[in-house]
Image: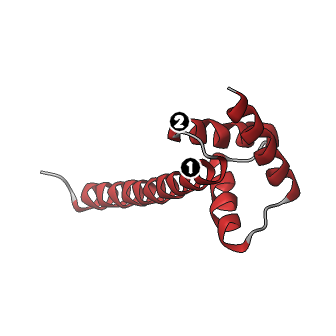
Amino acid sequence: MATEEELNERIDALEEEIGQLRHAVVSHTVVDQAIGVVIAVGHLRPEQGWEVLKEISQHTNTKLREVAEYVVQGAHCRWLPDEIHQALVDALKRAKAR
């Protein structure tokens, strides 16, 4: 039988895992919303929207989740940081040319 200390350690580990899973779900949701924005704005297929986000992330050296947050927020306030905006414009042009 497990000791109280072992049980508490297991509870702590499970609580940490739950926190990580919650963070992952939120991140996934934001990325999905950003894909939707990109495909709507760029008239692209969903897989192209994903590629555009990845390309922006790589070209600006910005985490994918942060790019997604900027894109989703930008859809509402009609503003993006200059570097993200230019990378989005360029990536959309390349995606349409494919």
Which element is circle 2 on? helix
Question: Is residue 45 rendered to the left or right of residue 75?
Answer: left
Please determine whether, in this image, residue 7 is positioned above or below residue 57.
below
Inter-mark Cα distance, 1 to 2 = 9 Å
Residue lying at 68% horizontally and 47% vertically, measured from the top left: 63
* Between discs 1 and 2, the one toward the N terminus: 1
- Identify residue for label 2: 47
Where residue 47 sits: x, y (%)? 53, 36
Which element is circle 1 on? helix
Mark 1 Cα shell of 10 Å, populated few (<14), some (14-19), many (≥20): many
- On residue 48, which mark appears? none
Where residue 8 sits: x, y (%)? 30, 62
Where residue 9 sits: x, y (%)? 34, 56
Residue lying at 50% horizontally and 52% vertically, measured from the top left: 32
- Identify residue for label 1: 35
Number of marks in the rendered image: 2
Tell which of 28 and 97 is nearer to you.
97
Residue, far top = 98
